[in-house]
Amino acid sequence: MKGSPERFRDVVIVGAGAAGGAAAAHLSRSGHDVVLVERDAEPRIKPCGGGMAASVQKWFPFSLEPAVEQVVRQVDFSWCLGDPVVAELPGEAPFWIVRRERLDQLLTDQAKQAGAECCAGVTVTDIGRDNDHWSVTAADGQRWRTRSVVIADGSASPWPQRLGLGAKRIQTATTMSVRLEGQGRLKNGTTRFEFGLVKQGFAWAFPVAGGVNIGVGSFIGKQDADPEQVLSLLLPDLGFPADAGLRQSGQLRVWNGHHRLNGNGIVVVGDAASLCDPFLAEGLRPALMSGCEAARHLDRWLRGDNNDLRGYTIAMRQRWGDSMAWGRRIAQVFYRFPGVGYQLGIKRPTAPRRIAQILSGEMGYGDIAQRVINRLLLQRG
């Protein structure tokens, strides 16, 4: 459907991924006139492990379970394919594995059912302030006048820096993702984290229905790890040929400080806002969190209950950023001395449970950070 330049909208959301879809679903359900603009004409495989805490369900008035393909009950850790640690997740499994294209489509469908207009295959070329409103222009000539804008087009987004939002100095993790058919030796309900093969990073394997998502990420320093070499060793260990799978390289923006995420009628969410966990590379939960939080504050602002959107930046700092500040410090120490980190961190009896609690949202990095950092530094010294 073509955008109409004569019609004044409440919200234009740029990007129909997890963060943009979550914002669109909430805002359209609240009765706002929403346009969701997506660059890709068709759903595509995204370089995302697809892991998220089951607790995110409480943020949505509709079920996310149609997108869930695995419920994780066990986490396996290894160092150079050996020295294993097995962690059983406590109580009800707090971790879901979703196929990202299915989750994104579910959120978009919910937004459409609530009245949002969705424009796929449309590339935004300009976003600018025009007196008391925003103007969003696309490559095909479509143009929208809108009261507000949500920037949700991922790690490659040019808009946050152009518009003075988010991180001024972007920090990225170098990633390679592989989608494989069949599960090899990886059991249903089990994820795998490998810390020894990747210099200043780690590799992961998450099961989906009938397949596995595997990733390699390097998080600090020069990030000169060779992901192909890592995969040539990891894939056979998991029961796959060394050259198997569809591979995608990328740069993932990670959290690197507290930054302003709002402007006058505009917010940035998800990977575009550099919210990805700098230690465990968790990006899906903060994407959904920020989309829901942005929708909550935009709803109040559009109704005239709030004078500005500063509350969104404050809320994301309190709910996510304060924990990530500690997570970043842990990452800087752990990935510089990964062997020590594995022995004193992952292999400690309480460590796997703590990691599970962090991934589930039950605990933040601040709850454990000072002890972890001191332990690592003292041992290194």
Image: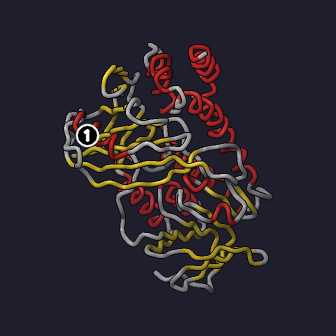
Q: Which of 92 and 361 is in front in this view?
A: 361
What is the x, y in percent for residue 74? Answer: 33, 27
Location of residue 11 by image quarter: bottom right
The colouring scheme, among rainbow, by chain, secondary structure or one colour, is secondary structure
Q: How many marks?
A: 1
Q: Mark 1 = which residue?
A: 235
Q: What x and y, as percent, mark residue 93?
A: 38, 30
Q: What amino acid type is highlighted by mark number 1?
A: Leu
The local secondary structure at tag 1 comes to: helix
* Position above or below: 96 against 90: below
Is residue 193 in view? yes
Q: Position of residue 257 (x, y in %)?
A: 68, 43
Q: Quadrant of the C terminus?
A: top right
> Few, some or many C-alpha atoms within 10 Å of disc 1 (few <14, some 14-19, many ≥20)?
many
Which image quadrant is residue 367 in? top right
Residue 116 in the image: above or below residue 206: below
Classify residue 379 as left or right of residue 226: right
In front here: 149 or 162?
Answer: 162
Q: In this view, does 332 lie to the left or right of 83?
A: right
Judged left or right of residue 41, residue 345 is: right
Can you say whether 292 is above or below 138 in the image?
above
Q: Residue at x 21, y 46 (%)?
A: 210
Q: Let me know if residue 353 appears in the view.
A: no
Depth check: give the residue in front, 178 or 285: 178
Residue located at (41% from left, 22% from top) = 90
Please give left or right for residue 302 compared with residue 197 in the image.
Answer: right
Residue 87 coordinates in the image, percent (x, y): 37, 21
Residue drawn at point x = 44 percent, y = 62 percent: 108
